[in-house]
Image: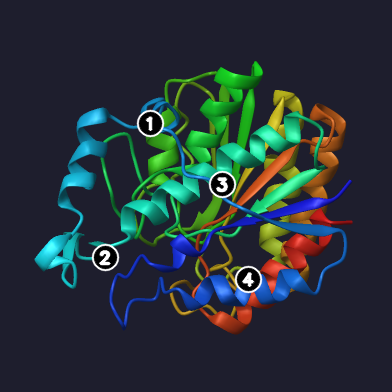
């Protein structure tokens, strides 16, 4: 079956500043790469509904973001939520399209309309916690997708897999006490945000695969091959959600891991095999990090190419 590429141009309106690494050109790089891949279909992302967000985020937190978004005479300004995370005019619509893409992808896959999906949206999400924006992230799209699948499609168990160079501390915080969601993350340690050590295990549902600076494909494949992928298969999820960050690439400026495009193809093959074995191939992937445009395009292309078969 085809792979859906889900996007909306509202995601380009989020503006954290001219020199910020999380810039709109990231989406163009991914979409250009995806356009070359057969067996894909580009569809528009809807906005998430309030109930989708409130399964994950506190209502007071969400309403606070909406109220802080610059508008009217201040629309040309930006609001700093922390030194790295900003709101501009258009940020709320961008975030809503990101979570909306995640929910729409889940709906399409459970309806049998696609084999899997990739959400080409921004800003990213895996640092956003229940009531916390940080690390470029406003809403946790992977978490929203997981809870949407459980609420709307009776998915008993969801596995969230994260191979961004940074630990998804927001995803871990949201699900640390939820045995119905498995979170498996490989990431560089030490590195921002300073979490993701192996002794952080939640209620037995968290597996952190720490990689030292300079680690490359050999270490990455060993961690996932020996621990990460077997943990996913043992969990027997009804859906796999992927936080697909491409900033562990050797060219990326924000980390010191040394992955190459073939490593992203390898982990995607493993995740597709796990999805085939556990949940009829159901897999939703969403863009997290990746800040060198050339590396982002090639690595995301490798990932999407395997998703599309």
Front disc: 4 or 3: 3
Q: Secondary structure at mark 4?
A: helix
State yes or no: discs 4 and 2 in contact (Cβ < 8 Å). no
Question: Could you tell me residue 43's position as x and y percent?
Answer: 67, 54
- Mark 1 or mark 2: whose residue is earlier in sequence: 1
Determine the residue positioned at 82% across, 69% down.
37
State the CA–CA distance, disc 4 to disc 1. 28 Å
Front disc: 4 or 2: 4
Query: Vertically, is 108 above or below 7?
Result: above
Label 4 belongs to which residue?
30
Question: Could you tell me residue 272's position as x and y percent?
Answer: 81, 45
State the CA–CA distance, disc 4 to disc 2. 22 Å
Label 3 belongs to which residue?
101
- Report the disc number at residue 84: 2
Label 1 belongs to which residue?
50
Q: Residue furthest left?
A: 73
Question: Could you tell me residue 99's position as x and y percent?
Answer: 48, 43
- Mark 2 or mark 3: whose residue is earlier in sequence: 2
Front disc: 1 or 2: 1
User: Which class describes the residues within 10 Å of circle 4: few (<14), some (14-19), or many (20+)?
Assistant: many
State yes or no: discs 1 and 2 in contact (Cβ < 8 Å). no
Relative to 281, 16 lies left or right: left
């Amino acid at each position: 079956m085809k792979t859906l590429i889900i996007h909306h141009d509202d995601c380009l309106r989020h503006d954290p500043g001219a020199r910020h690494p999380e810039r709109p050109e990231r989406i163009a790089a991914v979409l250009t790469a995806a356009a070359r891949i057969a067996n894909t279909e580009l569809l528009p992302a809807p906005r998430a509904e309030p109930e989708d967000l409130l399964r994950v985020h506190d209502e007071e937190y969400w309403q606070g973001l909406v109220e802080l978004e610059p508008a009217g005479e201040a629309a040309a300004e930006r609001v700093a939520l922390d030194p790295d995370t900003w709101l501009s005019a258009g940020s709320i619509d961008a975030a809503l399209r990101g979570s909306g893409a995640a929910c729409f992808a889940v709906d399409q896959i459970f309806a049998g309309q696609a084999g899997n999906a990739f959400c080409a949206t921004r800003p990213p999400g895996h640092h956003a916690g229940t009531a916390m924006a940080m690390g470029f992230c406003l809403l946790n799209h992977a978490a929203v997708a997981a809870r949407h699948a459980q609420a709307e499609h009776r998915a008993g168990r969801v596995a969230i897999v994260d191979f961004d160079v940074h630990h998804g501390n927001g995803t871990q915080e949201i699900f640390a006490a939820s045995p119905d969601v498995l979170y498996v993350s490989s990431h560089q340690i030490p590195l921002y945000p300073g979490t993701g050590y192996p002794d952080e295990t939640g209620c037995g549902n968290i597996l952190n695969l720490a990689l030292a600076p300079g680690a490359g494909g050999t270490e990455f494949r060993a961690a996932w091959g020996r621990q990460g992928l077997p943990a996913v298969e043992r969990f027997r999820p009804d859906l796999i959600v992927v936080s697909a960050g491409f900033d562990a690439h050797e060219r990326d400026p924000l980390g010191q891991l040394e992955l190459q495009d073939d490593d992203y193809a390898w982990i995607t093959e493993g995740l597709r095999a796990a999805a085939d074995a556990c949940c009829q191939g159901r897999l939703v992937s969403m863009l997290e990090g990746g800040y060198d445009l050339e590396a982002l395009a090639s690595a995301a292309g490798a990932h999407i190419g395997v998703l599309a078969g």
